[in-house]
């Protein structure tokens, strides 16, 4: 879906947002990106601030959330829910959204995804779908057969 180049990804976010603000025709991907951006007004300044916003650094030790990573995780969770991959994620989402709202449900889920991706990166292996699903299931108190 995305390029591996950080600058290209950030530019894609800014371009999709600018296009949405102008009322331009958006591709399906641009529509998803603009939708996530619209839900995060606290990040608009990075997208509307030209190169300075797009070049900003967000080291973990600074204690600031990386808005591009955060929004990317939202998009990833939405894609996973849409295709129910890993199997069962759509049900977890539905239960969480029923308890809270869709955005809060995604926030809880993206924490699980971030932890799973961090583990995979740290251990130089692919993400563990079973561990990810266990984390997600724990959000709704489901201790069923997780495979």
Image (tube, grey):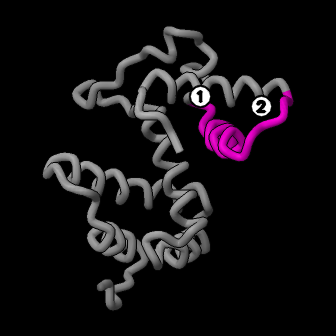
* Residue 23, percent from left and from top: 86, 30
Question: Tags 2 and 1 in contact by the CB under 8 Å rule?
Answer: no
Say what secondary structure mark 2 lies in: helix
Separation of marks 2 and 1 at Cα, in angstroms:
12 Å
Q: Nearer the viewer, mark 2 or mark 1?
A: 1
Answer left or right for 145 relative to 68: left
Question: What residue do we see at 49% from left, 75% from top?
Answer: 92
Say what secondary structure mark 1 lies in: helix
Give the magenta range.
Answer: 23-42
Question: What residue do we see at 35% from left, 59% from top?
Answer: 112
Is disc 2 surrounded by few (<14), some (14 to 19) or many (20+) residues within 10 Å? some
* Residue 55, percent from left and from top: 44, 14
Answer left or right for 74 relative to 66: right
Residue 56, picture quadrant:
top left
Question: What residue do we see at 72% from left, 46% from top?
Answer: 28
Q: Is residue 4 magenta?
A: no
Q: Residue furthest left?
A: 123
Sequence-wise first label, 2 or 1: 1
Is disc 1 surrounded by few (<14), some (14 to 19) or many (20+) residues within 10 Å? some
Please state which of residues 137 and 84 is positioned toward the viewer in this rendering.
84
The disc label shown at residue 35, or none: none
Q: Is residue 30 magenta?
A: yes
* Residue 85, percent from left and from top: 47, 69
* Residue 135, percent from left and from top: 32, 69
Residue at label 2? 20
Vertical position of residue 2 compared to residue 23: above or below: below
Q: Can you say which quadrant of the picture contains the C terminus?
A: bottom left
Question: What residue do we see at 46% from left, 77% from top?
Answer: 87
Instruction: Report the number of numbered marks.
Output: 2
Residue at label 1? 12
State the predominant SS element of the stretch in magenta. Answer: helix
């Amino acid at each position: 879906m995305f390029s591996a180049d950080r600058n290209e990804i950030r530019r894609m976010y800014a371009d999709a947002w600018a296009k949405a603000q102008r009322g331009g025709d958006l591709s399906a991907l641009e529509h998803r990106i603009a939708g996530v951006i619209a839900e995060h007004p606290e990040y608009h300044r990075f997208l509307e601030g030209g190169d300075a916003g797009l070049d900003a650094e967000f080291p973990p030790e600074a204690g600031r959330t990386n808005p591009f990573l955060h929004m990317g995780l939202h998009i990833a969770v939405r894609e996973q829910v849409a295709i129910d991959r890993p199997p069962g994620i759509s049900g977890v989402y539905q239960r969480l959204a029923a308890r809270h709202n869709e955005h809060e449900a995604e926030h809880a889920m993206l924490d699980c995804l971030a932890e799973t991706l961090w583990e995979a990166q740290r251990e130089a292996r692919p993400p563990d779908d079973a561990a990810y699903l266990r984390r997600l299931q724990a959000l709704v108190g489901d201790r069923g057969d997780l495979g």
